[in-house]
Amino acid sequence: MKERRRPGRPPKDPEARRTARLTINLTPEQMSAITQRAAAEGGLSRSDYALAACLGRPPARLVPAINRKTYDELHRIGVNLNQWMHAINAGQLPAAHLPSLEQLRALVQSVRNELRARRGERYQPGAPQ
């Protein structure tokens, strides 16, 4: 019998866990400067910003709120599309849903084109998606 996975985030690999601490003393002005720089880097925590700075890595940028909202909307669309595809493959999708499916396909293509346009790419029919 297949073992059920517990809900929630999977545990990190023990080697990837951050268990060591580094404590430094700062003036209030230094703390404020670090806090402001971390926020300017996309809302990073002071800890993540300081770690990146100390290791000489560029800080990981957080996804802007507008992109998260768009991602969430696309995710919901994808979930619905996946459910429809399961129904189609099982021969259970009512014909009344086919026009909605075509509208959804056109909407997804429109979103894809918009995202490519923002990255400076162009849609080319027949090109890999």
Image: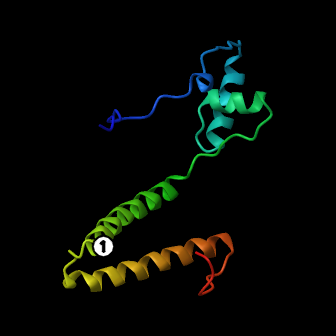
Q: Residue at x 62, y 71 (%)?
A: 118
Q: Residues within 10 Å of mark 1 (few under 14, many from 20)?
A: few
Q: Is residue 64 above or below residue 93?
A: above
Q: Secondary structure at mark 1?
A: helix
Query: What is the count of numbered marks?
Result: 1
Question: Residue 92's x, y, as percent?
Answer: 20, 74
Q: Nearer the viewer, residue 113 or 33?
A: 113
Residue on which the image places disc 1? 89
Inspect the image, locate mark 1, and give the three-letter code of the amino acid beneath it: Asn
Question: Residue 105's x, y, as percent?
Answer: 40, 79
Q: Is residue 33 above or below residue 129?
A: above
Q: Is residue 60 above or below residue 86?
A: above
Q: Quadrant of residue 52?
A: top right
Q: Is 47 placed left or right of 58 in the picture?
A: left
Q: Quadrant of residue 117?
A: bottom right
Q: Quadrant of residue 85?
A: bottom left
